[in-house]
Amino acid sequence: MDLRDLTYFETIAEVGHLGRAAEKLNRSQPALTKSIQRLEGALGARLFQREGRRIKLTEVGKLLLMRSRQLQLSIAQTQREVRDFASGVIGNIRLGCAASMADYLLPQLTASLLERAPEVTLKLSIGMDDVLRESLRSGRLDVIICPLVMEDSQFRTYPILQDEAIVVASADHPIFSSAIGLKDLCQYRWVLPAPSVTARRWIDNIFVSRQLPPPVVQIETNSISLLPRLIAQTQLLSFLARETLQQGQGMSRLREVPLLETTRTRTVAVTVRADGYLSPATRALVELLTEGEGRFFSEG
């Protein structure tokens, strides 16, 4: 079985069309057809079936796609490990960090890491936790820092501290004109991340579990840095990490909506793939975080 054939097979499976796959791979359709025929001959089974103008995977094809991705990831990890060993360098870290904590965590953490490992190189990705977990799962990231959701056998997770997420509004928001209950929040619109993000699911469930309609989202965004100014200039409500407001992010123009029901205590964790290769640099980063006792989250 040729690795090139597997690469072609993955692309064809992803786009579901032989012609578009040929354009994407810069190969001819007959060449891709022969590639699939070689794989089917080696496996003794059909990999695709026609569905109108498109093609879709058979059950055997779905199994091969899953195993092919695992194999390609294993090869990529092996190449990185061998390069690190051969060159003697400490390595590169592809680090993902949740947007809600990047501003107040990464500066001090990065400074401490470079002090311990001056030659390390970093590729930083800031995003929502759903995107970070998928990038870690697929091998595009080596390590992520984000709120802990649940145990996953594909990941190895190390809790590092707890923080709080709270509902916030502009300091002069009309909601503060009288006593506040959870039902009062239903009168206003919100700016929140996508439904696939953990914080969004949590805040939605708080309302639904109390037989209230979920927040009406007027603006959906993944930009945490935008939120303080946006909230301060509108009557929109939002849900933020308390530390985001306490680290120079516009605290004077914002105000917490003090409700026990909408105050979420969450565990922040550093997570790696259970079977993934960790460069010396990545191991050093994990050690810093697990030994840090939260100090990176509290220093300005």
Image (tube, rainbow, N blue to C red):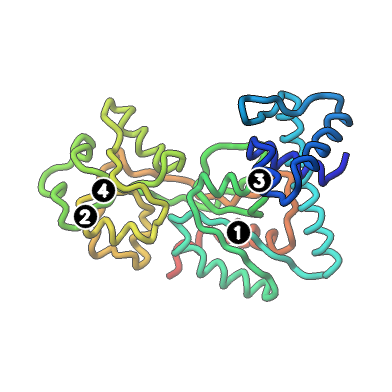
Pick whichever, 44 or 138, lies toward us. 44
- Quadrant of the image occupied by residue 115: bottom right
Mark 1 highlights which residue?
95
Circle 3: residue type: Ser
Distance between mark 1 and mark 3 Cα atoms: 14 Å
The disc at residue 140 is none
Other-residue count near label 4 (Cα within 10 Å), few / some / many at <14 / 14–19 / ≥20 = many
Name the residue: 62% across, 37% down: 152
**Distance of mark 4 from mark 3, alpha carbons?**
34 Å
The label on residue 237 is 4
Q: Residues within 10 Å of mark 1 (few under 14, many from 20)?
A: many
Foreground tag (4 vs 3): 3
Picture residue at 42% right of the left edge, 39% below the top: 195
The local secondary structure at tag 1 comes to strand
Q: Secondary structure at mark 4?
A: loop
Residue topped by disc 3: 138
3 or 2: tag closer to the N-terminus: 3
Q: Nearer the viewer, residue 249 or 242?
A: 249
- Of mark 1 and mark 4, the one earlier in the sequence is 1
Q: Which residue is tagged 2?
A: 234
Earlier residue among tags 4 and 3:
3
Three-letter residue code for mark 4: Leu
Q: CA distance from mark 1 to mark 2?
A: 34 Å
Give the number of the mark in front: 1 or 2: 2
Rendered location of residue 257, percent (x, y): 24, 48
Disc nearer the start of the sequence (1/3): 1
